[in-house]
Each structure stands twice: as structure tokens, then as C-alpha cells.
Amino acid sequence: MISWSGLTQTFEYSSGDVASPLGYRLCSTRLGRARATIRAGIIESVSSRRGTFITFEGLDGCGKSTQLERLAVVLRSRGVEIVATREPGGTATGERIRQLLLDVRTAGLDPHAELALMFASRAQHLREVILPALAAGQVVLCDRFTDSSEAYQGGGRKLGSAAILDLHRILCGGLQPDLTILMDSDVGSSVERARRRNRDRSPDIADESRFESENRAFFTRVHNAYLEIAKREPQRVLLVDARGSAEQTHGKIVDLVLARMNVPVEPRRTRNAG
Ligand SMILES: Nc1ncnc2c1ncn2[C@@H]1O[C@H](COP(=O)(O)OP(=O)(O)OP(=O)(O)O)[C@@H](O)[C@H]1O
Ligand SMILES: [Mg+2]
């Protein structure tokens, strides 16, 4: 069902695949239901979603990707349908933007251009991946989202929070994660870990070290901006101490997420299990 109201278009998907006025498809199912309000082709608000949107945030090398993967394994074993994705990237177009943004050979990129590219990737990601998955009632685990822009471009590049929050409202309809795991770590050790990981990568894997080549003052500003976000939105943003082993951090994250989500505590039994 698609409904329209005046200049502001409200469309609602309740069953089947429907092409949207923006030309993307929200692959909703009978169970899925998403509602977006659009004016002049821009998503103004997104509501009534059935799925759960969980984001991972933190400094380079703090362990986001490691922990996201491990959480996905746990949730899947409990029968939860997971879409694991990342930013920048997550779509074919977004991955091309990611290459440009993270490649150390991209020299002299203006901070505003960097911010615009981050949001270009995000807008595409939202329409192509995140909204359809939420409409279908899935759990979206996303490695970085708008908090990263606020921390890196707002804090690190000193563009301030206001510009990022405005862009988020205009381009992303203000969509907020249900839960954000902010992995708190020490600036020096986590960035060093990311640098080591990048050095150890096989030459076939794309160079993604542009941000890691920034200095300590930059990452301290990023870290402080993250802490400000956590202070501003304590309901959404859960600060997790990520200084321990990957196993210890995993335990903390699983406890927090299961406490917030209505998922069975016991793993799902497979058919062949005795
Ligand atoms: N708790 C931990 N202790 C030690 N090493 C870890 C821990 N968690 C992850 N690592 C290792 O540190 C490196 C960085 O981890 P990972 O890639 O998960 O971080 P990330 O936050 O996703 O980094 P980036 O922001 O650069 O994508 C990897 O080599 C990973 O195996
Ligand atoms: Mg990562």
C-alpha cells in the first residue's frame, strides 16, 4: 500500500516488493512495515519499523568488526535473522566510495568533501540495505553509522556536530539506531592495532589506511566527540570498555544486546541435534 498526503509524500509498505518514489525497492514482506515521509525526494522521517538497528562505533582498531561478526554468530544461533553491513560501503556504490575515502592515495581531500562522500554512501546504504531489512523485521548490525561522521568529521576534522546532525536529518530522515555499541578504547593502542592489521594484510586487499595515518591529536578529538555523543544519548549509546581481550569484550556485548532484545536465551537446536 502506498499513500500520499499533499506536498509531503507518505508511503507505507505492507506486503510484497514495491518500487518506491525514489526508485529503490523496499523489499518488505507481509511481516515487514516501514513508513517514510518524503518531501522533494528527501526522506524526512522513518518510523514504524519492525526490525532492530544496532550500530558499532569506536576508534580505528578498537575491535568493531571483530565484535560485530561474533555477535552475528550468537544471534544467528538463536534464530535471529541478521543483516551485517558496514559504512562507508554496504552497497556496490558505497563500496566504491569507501575505496576513495579510505585509500591513503586519496590525498588533499577537503573535510567537507569527505563529509559529503560519507553521507552519499550512507544515503545509498539506507535506501538499498538498511530500510528494506528493517521493514522486513530483520536485525541490522552496522559497522559505523552517523556517529562516526560526528566523531571523525565533526570532532576530528573540526566541522562541528551541527552540520552532521543537519545532514543526517535531511539525507537519512533522522533514522536513529535502536542501540549503539560504543567501544571505548585507548587512542594509542587501538590505532596502533589497526595500523598493524593493515601492514599485515595481503597485498590483494585494498589499502584502507588513510584515517590511520592521522596523528594522535586527531584521534583524541574523535574519542572526545564519541564520549560527548554517549553523554548526550545515554539511552541509545552504550559505552563498552573494549580494552580487554576480544573474548571479554564479546561477553560484555552479548550480555548488553540480549538484555535489550527479546531473543531466546538458549541457542536454537538444529534439526539433527539430539
Ligand atoms: N580485544 C582485542 N585485543 C587484541 N586484539 C584485538 C582485539 N579485538 C580485535 N583485535 C585485533 O585488532 C585488529 C583490529 O580489530 P578490528 O579490525 O576488529 O577493529 P575495527 O574497530 O573494526 O577497526 P577499523 O575501524 O579500522 O575497521 C585486528 O587485527 C583484530 O584481530
Ligand atoms: Mg573494522
Image (tube, rainbow, N blue to C red):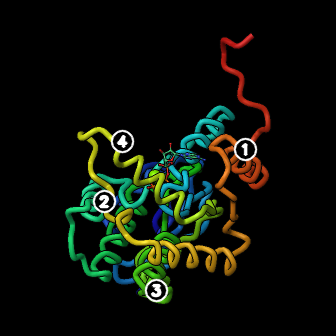
Secondary structure under badge 3? helix
- Label 4 vs label 1: CA separation? 27 Å
- Label 3 vs label 4: CA separation? 39 Å
Q: Residues within 10 Å of mark 4 (few under 14, many from 20)?
A: few
Mark 1 against mark 2, which lies toward the viewer?
Answer: 1
> Which residue is pictured at 49% across the width and 55% down the height?
61
Please tell me whether residue 152 is drawn above or below residue 262 in the rendered image: below
> Which residue is pictured at 48% across the width and 72% down the height?
219
Which of the 4 image quadrants contains residue 127?
Answer: bottom left
> Which residue is pictured at 69% across the width and 58% down the height?
241
> Which residue is pictured at 48% across the width and 81% down the height?
155
Secondary structure under badge 1? helix
Are dots 4 and 1 in contact, CB under 8 Å?
A: no
Tell me the tag on residue 197. none
- Kind of residue at disc 3: Asp
- Label 2 vs label 4: CA separation? 20 Å
Mark 3 against mark 4, which lies toward the viewer?
Answer: 4
Please tell me whether residue 117 is drawn above or below residue 50 in the rendered image: below
Q: Position of residue 158 (x, y in %)?
A: 43, 86
Are dots 3 and 2 in contact, CB under 8 Å?
A: no
Instruction: State yes or no: Cβ of the residue under disc 4 lies below 8 Å from any atom of ligand 1.
Output: yes
- Kind of residue at disc 1: Gly
Tell me the tag on residue 98. 2
Q: Which residue is mark 3?
A: 166
Q: Residues within 10 Å of mark 2 (few under 14, many from 20)?
A: many
Instruction: State yes or no: Cβ of the residue under disc 2 lies below 8 Å from any atom of ligand 1.
Output: no
Task: Tell me the quarter of the image containing the C terminus.
Answer: top right
Q: Which residue is mark 4?
A: 200
Q: Which residue is mark 1?
A: 251
